[in-house]
Amino acid sequence: MKQLILVWEIPLALLSLLFYKVMKFIIGNLFTIYLAVNKNKASQWRVLSQETLDSALSLPVLMTKGPRWNTHAIIGTLGPFKVEQEVSLNITTANSSAGSWIAVVYSFPGYKTITSLESSKISSDNDWYSIKLPPGKYSFGLRYYNRLDKITLPEIKIDDNNFAEAQNIPTDNNDFYHNLIQAKNWFYSSLHYYIFTILKLRKFLPESFIRKEFLPVGAPDTFFAYNYLGRQQSLSLEFTQDIIDNCNIYFNLYDRSSLPLSWCEITTTEYNLAAPVTNGYYLLRIRPQTGFSFDTSKIQFQVITENDLLQQALISR
């Protein structure tokens, strides 16, 4: 029966992959044109919120550029902008808004990760911190985790000139995720249909290919663990105590169209999830806590048991 299913599922997955690549190219170019025309938007924080999603192009852009939704972070982006020497941000504002954060500089328009700045790895002795860059065009992304009572995206300078003003964010900004699944339609289902299939065929495919497709934009300071999860297949995760003690562990479950179904922060060595009613996949973001030096490259993700009724995995260091 499994072989018969793959006979028709693999061709559909190949069509989905092709459809995703074509749509990503088209939508990406439309977004680049939009930013070029609306240059005044480059210096204003674009916060991922319901207001953002209400604009016509936003959801298709997000579903092709960064489709594995991060429901645990407040996310702001800036750019594109030209840099001669450096981009600077007010880290005092960032530290007073979140328990931890990461700032990432991307190339533009390629959106390749150039460098990053993590709150856990820098001193807070000064109000500002500068990131040295080669001359070029860039965009900027900021993620706030464990946000505090007052949330403010920081001031940004480029080559010591003011570029973006601080912006206050409401504490309920991320509530829109609870209704995001209602945006599901044939278009988004077709875009991401192939992801479930390639995860299911993971042992036959290069891991670099799987990672590139599943994580188009990954954070350098984060370890990612992910796999498919079939309907009626329960999930059991086990963590070693040192990871629980020294990391924040964020769990997301997505349906096959890559829209979030459920999420939580894991704080115990064992986590169990009842079988979902639909095929999908899950993602763990494991981040070292502020003040702790932790090499995420040393973390391992091992699926121990995998059958139609149960998937059991161990995350260790």
Image: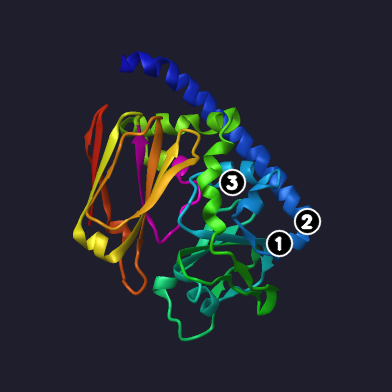
Q: Circle 3: is it few (<14), some (14-19), or many (20+) Cα within 10 Å?
A: some
Residue 287, given in percent of the width and then of the height, sits at 36, 61
What residue is pinned by disc 3? 62
Instruction: Examine the structure image and report whether residue 139 is included in the region drawn in magenta.
Output: no
Q: Give the residues drawn in magenta, as a range.
A: 212-229
Q: Nearer the viewer, residue 95 or 80?
A: 95
Image marks 1 and 2: residues in contact by CB distance under 8 Å:
yes
Residue 167, given in percent of the width and then of the height, sits at 64, 70
Q: Nearer the viewer, residue 203 or 249?
A: 249
Identity of the residue drawn at 24% across and 33% down: 310
What residue is pinned by disc 1? 42
Work out how far the residue at label 2 is from the one at label 3, CA to CA, in angstroms: 18 Å
**Vertical side of 45 occupied by 181: above or below:** above
What residue is pinned by disc 2? 38
Identity of the residue drawn at 54% across and 77% down: 93
Q: Amino acid at mark 2?
A: Asn
**Vertical side of 290 occupied by 203: above or below:** above
